[in-house]
Structures are given as structure tokens and as C-alpha cells.
Image: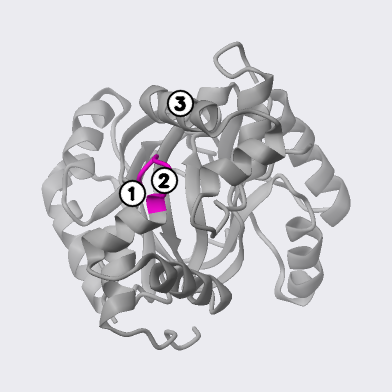
Amino acid sequence: MREAASIDALDRAIIDRLQGDFPISECPYAEAAAALGIDEGELIARLQRLLDTRVLTRFGPMFQVERMGGSFVLAAMRVPDAEWEHVVEAVNAFPEVAHNYRRESSQNCDFNMWFVLATEKPDGIEQAVQKIEAATGLSVFPFPKLKEYFVEMKLEVRT
Amino acid sequence: MNKATDDIDRRLVLATQSGLPLVPRPYDELGAQLGIPAAEVMARLASMLASGVIRRIGAVPNHYAIGYTANGMSVWDVPDERIDELGARVGALDFVTHCYHRPRKLPEWPYSLFAMVHGTSREEVLAKVAQIAELLGSDCRAHDVLFSTQILKKTGLRIGA
């Protein structure tokens, strides 16, 4: 696992305070910056740097694709070590793959690649599954959510 | 997209899915790109936020980079007739960031309740997973924790133009 990027107290404050509620107003950066006690230019420069150094993966709206008539589905594969690199490349090449993680089980489960498919139409998921299976020669196991009990992906900076 | 989002909303999604412009007046810039007034951009974003099409607007951290180097997907085999009650209770734990009911894939996959737990070490995550196990008690028939060892991709939604 790679080392955490170096960030200072102001970066931490920006990340902790701006994981939601970014203003919808004429000069939202100025407004958010004022709440942090800095000026607009500094906030914009800091956000740019946090994006460039990949401390932030994105700054903007987080869409809930289901509410737009689309689908968002977790899926898993069992990828043999020998095929790992080429399967990563093949799977990641699909724009429908929104994120992808390598995972290891604490027991002996061999589902080791877990990705999320996001498509604009519900039938896009089945098509993406078929395309990924064709491209890799491996089975894809979709785990659509049957019920969502809780989602709140805001995390306080720990570094 | 369904009728809840029209063509202009769709173009607004396309224009912002990789991020907001980092300029002093980002909604003016989006309005110029889409050929609509900034006020309409703001009204449409506010409406998508209110309806849940947009979950929130802000920073999306790489959780490894902000110190959450241990990220465990805990998965549980619990009785179907109990899952909604148990899912609500597990989801209410303050360290669980996502909690879902998902289908089993027998025989390979017996688990139906998924709860994501983040921490700075595997020990911290495992201690939290033990708290979930305690809460579930005898309703837990089997469980596993899958730790992520590498982010292979993290771009978020990308719909086509």
C-alpha cells in the first residue's frame, strides 16, 4: 500500500469541511474559503494541488446514478495471479467500471477483484458484464444491492 | 435517463462528472459551456441535490491518502427474515460507511449483508468487525472480511456524451 501523501493542517481542514455542502452561489469558492478563514485564490490553488497529488480523486457533485434511471452495481471476479495484470488492464478499460479494488479475504474466499459498474441505463449492466466476460474469459459475479441500509462516505482526515 | 432528468440536466452531468471548474465563478463557466444562464445551472444543481440525483457536492478524498489505509468489506451470512432489522442496526454503527443487502451466490458466496469499515490499521478494522459480530450474535452464521490491497481504478461515474 502506498504511503499517504503529505498534507498540512489547512489541507486537512479543507478536506474535512468540504466533503459536502459546497455552496451553489455565484462565487462558491470565495464563500467556502471565507468559512475556512482563507481567500478564494488559496482555496482554489490548494484544491488543484490536492487533485494533482491525488489526495482528492475529484471535486464536484457526486451523482446517484439510480436516481437518473441508471444502475450502479458491485461485481466480483476470481482472477488467477498469472492473469492479473492483463485482466486489470482489460477491466479498467471499460468506462462502465467506476472503481476497482484488489481485495484479499481473511478466510479462503478467492473473489479477489471487486469493481463497481455504473451505467446510464439499467440494461447497460448486463451488457457490461458480458463484455467484460468476453474480454477476460472469466466469470463476472454481479452483486446488485437489494436494499441500502446506510451510505455516508465522509471520513475525517487521519494523517 | 428517465423523465426526472431532462436533456439539459444530462448535459450538466456530463459537464461536471469529472469535477467542477476550479475558477472563481464555476457555475458561470458551466452556463457558458451549456449555453444557459448561470442562474439556471445553479437552480438545476439545487434541484438535483434536493431530489437525490446529486448526493452531495464537494471533495471526494482518496481514503488511502487521508490515512484510511485499512479498508475492510465485511460480509455476513444472516437469516433472510432478519436481514432488514440487522442491516439497519449495523448501518447505524458510527464506523460503518456503507451497508447493503446483496444477493448470495451459492455455493461460492453465502454472504448477504455487506458493511464497509475503514480504519488506519487492519487491527482497528478487525476490532470494529468484532463489534459487528457481537451485535449480530447468533444471527451471524458465517462471515469474512475482504481487505483492499490496491486501488486499481477510481474515477466515479462516467456516462457517455
The image quarter containing residue B4 is top right
Q: Are marks 2 and 1 in contact (CB under 8 Å)?
A: yes
Left or right: where does residue B31 sit relative to residue B52?
right
| Number of other residues with Cα within 10 Å of mark 3, as a class: few under 14, some 14 to 19, many 20 or more | some
| Number of other residues with Cα within 10 Å of mark 2, as a class: few under 14, some 14 to 19, many 20 or more | many
| Amino acid type for the residue under numbered disc 1 | Gly
Per the image, the residue denoted by label 2 is B57
Label 3 residue SS: helix
| Amino acid type for the residue under numbered disc 3 | Ala
**Magenta extent:** A22-28
Q: Which mark is residue B43?
A: 3
Distance of label 2 from label 1 (alpha carbons): 5 Å
Q: Residue at x 42, y 58 (%)?
A: B59
Q: Which mark is residue A20?
A: 1
Magenta residue check for A25 = yes
How far from the left and from the top, in percent, is residue A21?
A: 31, 45
